[in-house]
Amino acid sequence: MLLTGADADHTVDWDFQVTAGRRAGEWSTIPTPSNWECHGFGSYHYGGDLVPAEKGNYRHRFTPPASWAGRRVFLVFEAAMTDADVRVNGVSAGPVHRGGFYRFRYDVTALLRLGEPNLLEVTVSKESADNSVNDAERRGDFWNFGGIFRPVSLEAYPAARIDQVAIDARADGTFAAHVTLAGVTAAAQLTAQLRRLDGTAVGGTFSVAVASGSTGATLTTTAAQPALWTAETPNLHRVELTLVSSAGAPLHSTVERFGFRTIEVRAGDGIYLNGRRIVLKGANRHTFWPTSGRASSPRLARLDIGLMKDMNMNAVRMSHYPPDAFFLDLCDELGLYVLDELTGWQHRYDEGVGAPLVKAMVERDVNHPSILFWDNGNEGGWNTALDDDFGQYDPQQRAVLHPWTTFGGIDTSHYQTYSSTASKVAGGTVFMPTEFLHGLYDGGAGAGLNDYWKLMGGSQRSAGGFIWALVDESVVRDDRGGALDTNGSRAPDGILGPYREKEGSFCTIKDIWSPVQPANSAYYDSVFPASFDKTVKLVNRYDFTNLRECRFAWRLLAFPLPGAGTGHQVLAQGQAAAPDVAPGATGAVTLDLPADWTGADALRLSVTDPTGRNITAWTWRIRKAPDFATRLVRPATTGSVTAAETAGEVTLVAGATRITISKAGGRLTGVRRGSSPVSLANGPAPAGGTATLTGFSHFRDGTGWVVQADYSGDLTSVRWRLDANGWLRLEYRYRATGDHDHLGVNFDYPEAGVRGLTWLGDGPYRVYKNRLRGVQPDVWHKPYNDTATGASGFAYPEFKGYHGRTCWAVLDTTEGAITMVAAEEGLYLRLFTPKVGPDPQNAVVTYPAGGISLLDGIAPIGTKFHGVAALGPESRPNAATGDYHRTVYFRFDA
């Protein structure tokens, strides 16, 4: 019988009063389950803050059924933050419960009036009376909330009952159920039947005798070749347990769900599931939603799990507390490996208060096959006296980890540099960082992952790792007009925004962690390999799945030209026979393309897994940038350009287009389209280095007019040519050697005049030198936004930054459209300098001067804890190799 609602989406109002902060002293109502801060009560607090003596007083009236006479009735709280003092009809239900993330219950049989109204009163203290609870839970690096944030229910049982079941089901089919009994006052029998979830029996019934007064029994059997549970094959079973009297009458029955699987940590080797080595690809997940805090629902849990699986993650770490039970149910059903964690963030529970919390966590969660490990706190927040407590309640004897150090046979060290990661994966201990590549703002997460995963994904002693973190923890502050608060730089760490907006790293992680990868590194480029023979060699990175179970589909695409829309047209499509490639092996998929396939602009190959989820797609451009330039920029066949010279400038006029170039620097100083100015100017200026003008000339060239500027320094020459049809060609040459953050040239343009961008290139997200994977070539559009990733704005994809492999781009401005067309491959288009949240620490990236840049090399971005120098090869500066030449065309339209 639920007394609250079932979850944050389905609530029941209780009477409520908070003692401090907003609305202090006022009796009102509050939806339950919930955190009171999210409903206008109390104060917002982030871990480490000093918290006033804030308490919440709850009252709720309920009527238990009269038919419960003779039963034992328990009042069950799934969790309450942080100390809970419970009274039924004015009488204490039992000792104050301390600890905010754990199930607890009281036997209230003697306190209830069955069939009549009863009064439940609960005082929840946001701060605990036990300092070690506050240290472990309330001083961590996360938001602190208060309240009854998980459901409360009444549960009625017969006097003789099954109280707890702990299952150990192994990959070899052996099964044991360790059953805790209560109220057995006469000889009885405990019987069991295994079934698949569709109800099909697995073997026959099995049983064990139960003597009078027994408090426990163990049932065992063996299933013949059961379907095994893995994250790739989440096969579940259930066991039906019945306590039967000596006369054969059923006394109590219950059903538990489980999975057959065996988890092993092989010292100096790896993590093995069902005898096969596995690699965990995961994120750290807080239970969090901006408007409901830690109160959640199956809908939100399913959303997060779906997004993780969309990124090809197979694992999740509970940070830093056990989640809602329904989250673990969904991990079992959908297939996700779990690290379940006892709370403790650099501080620990004392043993007296911690031991009951370990018991509560393990007893609630023990039968979830998704849970591979127990975490005893985080980053020093473990009490070693509790390490052996986990095994008392877990017959599977899962390994206990100390996240941040080496324990349980696994080195879980956090935030290693690239070089220290290389050392660890080459060492003798299994390495699986429970936090790495901290995703503050837009740094980390996907940025740097390609290099790290080359080390971590293939080493024998690497067992994978967990990126920090899944979502930005941004609270809606009703005391600040609904603003999203990330507590400065402490909480915007997500791959996803607070409302699960996909940030740039989302697609990068999906690409790098796809279990199907090209065997040839040339296929990571969006430009089509010249040697393509209609076959794509593949590597199967699954742990259990043969690629013949996947689906492969191809499409030939045509891209629209500027002004003709976005996206692409599908010219032809088909299925490809899935190759027979075992896990870890290499094979190839052959595409049955039509004879005229080379006439398309691009080829896309997509792969879906056995459940129909897209796991990867590659788009390769058949047409290169010069092809699109030839298609777009047609030389004039008639007309001419006029030129006018003053002491300081040369002005070229072609119809309505007027271009002015400085004689002192060879740079663009003015553009007009008819009577309207276009504010593109002050370029091309070198993105790095110097340019001293040594020569300047201008002359007619057929239907066009050329302005030539020569320089000493890093920029060597610039040639402008305005054609009679209005196309302005820019050719520039520069020389660079050694290391550089940027290679290319800059222009100025006022950001305030920009409305949007449409472009053919890799998108839709911006890129960094160390985050190039995951974007796809297409014709994309995005309106202007001023998002500071994770901190403000929250509009994605972000408008500003580096855009990869741009063929053409149309900048929509209040002054008209500025079209830019690259004549060669590999152009990075930089648009302005993105806004960054407060205190980014090392999660910074450099940008050149000016507002718009045409670049051959771009900068990497760091993570919260490491600058780019500590990350991998892709995070190093651009190694310039000498002379560079590039041609870009411009057109200015109303």
Image (cartoon, grey):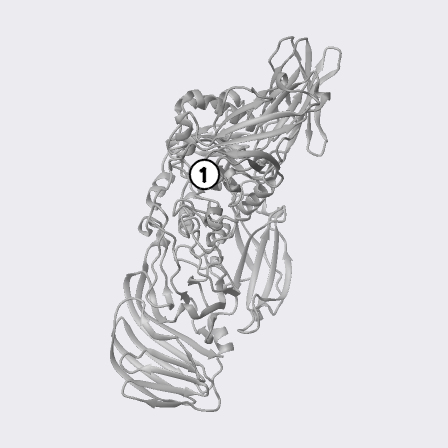
* Vertical side of 642 occupied by 320: above or below: above
Q: Is 148 on the left-hand or right-hand side of 869? A: right
- Residue holding disc 1: 21
Q: Is 197 on the left-hand or right-hand side of 402? A: right
Residue 535 percent location from the top left of the image: 56, 58
Q: Residue at x 71, y 23 (%)?
A: 115
Query: Which residue is at the far front?
Result: 26
Q: Nearer the viewer, residue 201 or 481?
A: 481
**Residue 643 seen anywhere in this rendered image of the structure:** yes
Q: Residue at x 47, y 70 (%)?
A: 809
The type of residue carrying mark 1 is Gly
Residue 737 percent location from the top left of the image: 28, 64
Residue 587 percent location from the top left of the image: 54, 50
Q: Give SS at disc 1.
A: loop
Numbered label tally: 1
Residue 882 percent location from the top left of the image: 30, 67
Q: In which quarter of the view is residue 324 placed?
A: top right
How packed mark 1 is, by other alpha carbons closer than 10 Å (few <14, some 14-19, many 20 or more), is some
* Vertical side of 667 occupied by 403: above or below: above
**Residue 409 seen anywhere in this rendered image of the structure:** no
Q: In which quarter of the view is residue 255 placed?
A: top right
* Vertical side of 472 occupied by 757: above or below: below
Quarter the N terminus occupies: top right
Q: Nearer the viewer, residue 361 or 148?
A: 148
